[in-house]
Image: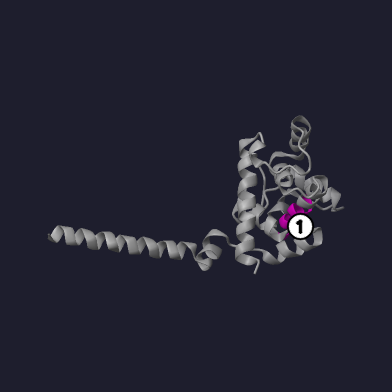
Amino acid sequence: MRIRTWLRVLVVGLLFATMGAYAVFTSEGFQKKYMYPFLYQEAVYTYALERDIDPFLIAGVIRTESKFINGAQSPKGALGLMQIMPETGRWIAEQLGEKDYMTADLSDPDRNIRFGSWYLASLKKEFGGNEVLILAAYNGGRGNVKQWMERYGWTKDFDDIQQIPFKETREYVEKVIYSKNRYRELYGK
């Protein structure tokens, strides 16, 4: 009889502990601090406004690309918060008329967000504002997205993420859109 009583106490205790942990984990404060931090907000909002890009989309890209770790570097060589390849950074600098560009500039949070926001805006213009295509191009390359559009008959209204032929790009688009929506829920009040 005693063992049964202790088992009940243990099960009830575990149930309450689990409920408490779930409440903490799903709380807005925990989510903002640990799951969806929003560092560099001033730069994100500044360049989002300047380039007519949703700031929560930029935040979703940064979270997915680097988790807001400024010194992030991918195995392929992409740098900074928005994981910009050095060649892409050089091209963006040329488009912006910046003659003093150096690859190390991509490690500067402000410049990285400015370049990444400009690049998202150029993709937005090219793909008619379609976030699925914009994000697919950001991850998989604009040339690949143009080929897919031609090969599969996608229009600028395309929204079926599951049709994206690269698994990495498909998962990337899903993650960024999910993160964008979470940032809007947490910070868009």
The residue sitting at 66% across, 33% down in the picture is: 165
- Image colouring: one colour
Question: Where residue 94 sits: x, y (%)?
Answer: 85, 48
Density class for disc 1 (Cα within 10 Å; few <14, some 14-19, many ≥20) is some
- Label 1 sits on what residue type? Ile
Left/right of residue 73 with respect to residue 112 in the rendered view = left
Farthest residue in the left direction?
1
Q: Quadrant of residue 60?
A: bottom right
For residue 38, above or below residue 87: below
Left/right of residue 121 with respect to residue 20 in the rendered view = right
The residue sitting at 61% across, 63% down in the picture is: 185
Secondary structure type for disc 1: loop
Left/right of residue 147 with respect to residue 56 in the rendered view = right
Q: Magenta: predominant secondary structure element?
A: helix
Residue at image mark 1: 53
Query: Could you tell me if residue 81 is visible in this image?
Result: no
For the residue pair 40 and 168, the one nearer the viewer reads as 168
For residue 29, above or below residue 136: below
Farthest residue in the top direction?
151
Q: Is residue 127 magenta?
A: no
For the residue pair 158 and 70, the one nearer the viewer reads as 158
Q: Quadrant of residue 74?
A: top right
Question: Where residue 22 sits: x, y (%)?
Answer: 43, 61
Q: What segment carries the magenta color?
A: 110-119
Which corner quadrant holds the N terminus?
bottom left
Left/right of residue 73 with respect to residue 54 in the rendered view = left
Question: Where residue 14 sits: x, y (%)?
Answer: 31, 60
Query: Could you tell me if residue 156 is visible in this image?
Result: yes
Which corner quadrant holds the C terminus?
bottom right
Q: Quadrant of residue 180?
A: bottom right
Question: Where residue 126 sits: x, y (%)?
Answer: 82, 45
For the residue pair 177 and 55, the one nearer the viewer reads as 177
